[in-house]
Amino acid sequence: MKKSWYKEMVVYQIWPRSFCDGNGDGIGDLKGILSKLDYVKSLGADAIWFSPLFVSPQRDYGYDIADYRDIQPEYGTLDDFKEVLEECHKRDIKVIMDLVINHTSTDHHWFKEACKSVDNPYHDYYIWRKGKGKNGKKPPNNWLSTFEGGAWEYVEAVDEYYLHVFTKGQPDLNMDNPKVRQEVKDIMKFWLDMGVDGFREDVITYISKKEGLPNGFPIPVACGMEHYNGGPHLYEYLKEFHDDVLSKYDCFTVGEGPLLTTERALKFVTEGDGQVLKTMFSFDHLEADCFMTDWIKTPFNLKKMKKCYQKWYDAMNGKAWHTLYLENHDHPRIVDRYGSLKYRVESAKMLATMCYLQKGTVFIYQGQEIGMTNIELKSIDEFKDMITFNNQIMFNKLGIKGEKFIKLANAGSRENSRTPVQWNDGPYAGFSTAEPWFTLNPNYKEINVAAAEADEDSILHYYRKLLKFRKENEVAIYGDFKQYNKNSKQLFVYERNLDGVKLLVVSSFTEDSVSFKAPDGIDLSKGELVLSNYNDGELSGNGFTTKPYETRVYLFK
Ligand code: NOJ
């Protein structure tokens, strides 16, 4: 496969509100980010993906944009952003912005205009329909939002309903309108001309809705999704964005599309003339301990996870490039889920090794590199996210209320990944000099960046070693992937091969001792143990008995 800078890249994701507060108001901002760029670089990051920094009422914490060309005042100004961009580039860090074009905020001036009258030039920027029923008081179809009840909201001034597949503050744009597509292209150009290096494209597979907006299969949440996830004109619109804008820049794009299948992804990312996105995020590897959503927990199933990795590798290999990630702002922290809090340090190192030595562009979420964990909030008043409140209504109907619901939310909600980053054990964990906007995890006294810097054996130092190794060994980036012990419920074993160089990665997902025997044809004593989360690499015969959550990486040259 063709080599490319973005394939070798390590991307660090910043969710700005909780990263670092530079002006003492309890909210993360650009000044805070600026003060941590050397830290981000020291990890081995080649790029930063910024979750939305744009002007927004923050009902969905930036994924509801009111102005695509300016910065949320709480975070700073456009000039502050330009300074961050320049300082990133000085350090050879690329900058990737979050492009949220399925919907805007209701605070966007397009939407305010659109609500004034059906003749307003912006009316057709959104998806409007007349109500149904005798008095037109019923919504146009049975679609439900992912975040907040029904997917339609009535606006009296125009006597129509607008579509919102997320919250009612996030009206869906009408991408069938060529003027809207032109706006999107202009927004892309605006940022690319300023010097940014690419986009993460939010729910990009939702931007084309089926003609006639037919009723959806009746499910209690996101009903109708089959009519807009992977809709009829999706490829055509992405091709237009690609051909008219993106292809003119040496930029990176990564698409997000819920319930993404390999078939759908390949349409967009297969290399060659028809390619419209560089890569995409898949989700199913994060469903090895839940059913469809993080809120419905199942016991962790290693075989399920391994199958997902294999499936994506098989589909993409030789054709397209994939992504590797364990955390982002939409899921609970990984170490609580696939690892162990008892063996937090060991399992966090193991998870990183297992994931990032596979084939794909690496994404790391803020705080993951120090093994931040989930939070235990005590009452519903402490929660902040629309999804939590929507789920509260749904689960209450099922009889899951009070403490039972809080327990569920603590385990499943994405608020877990949004607690402020723990920089040190001082006041407010060094995140701010004022009370942070969201609860700090009380474990910041032990789990923080300063402590990790001071401890040679920390998760942080291990991440640095791991990412340096990946950078210096092409086999870890471009090598083929082959699994062994596929039926093991405890071990994930794979090798990577490139031009006669082999990497063998053995990872245990249990605290129990497991006996590992090297696959036929591999002599462990001939390999160099290049990475491990324990300090001894003892062998017994051509294998070893694993320690809790042990990971070992052997290099054969
Ligand atoms: C996906 C984003 O990652 C998530 O945070 C957001 O709420 C939805 N898209 C809606 O924009």
Image (tube, rainbow, N blue to C red):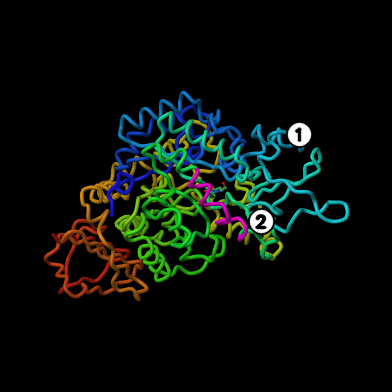
Residue at 36 percent of width and 54 percent of height: 321
Q: Nearer the viewer, residue 199 or 345?
A: 199
Asked whether mark 1 and ligand 1 are closer than 8 Å, the reply comes as no
| Magenta residues (range) | 226-240
- Determine crowd level at label 1: few under 14, some 14-19, many 20+ residues with C-alpha closer than 10 A: some
Main structural element of the magenta stretch: helix, strand or loop? helix
Q: Residue 406 appears at what percent x and percent y? A: 61, 57
- Determine crowd level at label 2: few under 14, some 14-19, many 20+ residues with C-alpha closer than 10 A: many
Against 376, residue 17 (above or below) is: above
Q: Residue 361 appears at what percent x and percent y? A: 35, 50
Quarter of the figure that contains the N terminus: bottom left
Residue at 55 percent of width and 56 percent of height: 230
Is residue 349 visible to the viewer in this orientation of the structure?
A: no
Where residue 67 sits, quadrant-wise, is: top right
* Outermost residue to the top: 79
Gap in angstroms between the C-alphas marked 1 and 2: 34 Å
Q: Residue 271 appears at what percent x and percent y? A: 36, 53
Q: Residue 93 appears at what percent x and percent y? A: 34, 36
The residue indicated by pointer 1 is 116
Residue at 36 percent of width and 42 percent of height: 449
Q: Is residue 293 left or right of residue 504?
A: right
Quarter of the figure that contains the C terminus: bottom left
Against 251, residue 542 (above or below) is: below
Task: Tell us which disc is closer to us: 1 or 2.
Answer: 1
Q: Nearer the viewer, residue 424 or 45?
A: 45
Q: Is residue 543 magenta?
A: no
Count of marks, rendered view: 2
Where residue 36 sits, quadrant-wise, is: top left
The residue indicated by pointer 2 is 392
Q: Is residue 103 left or right of residue 432?
A: right
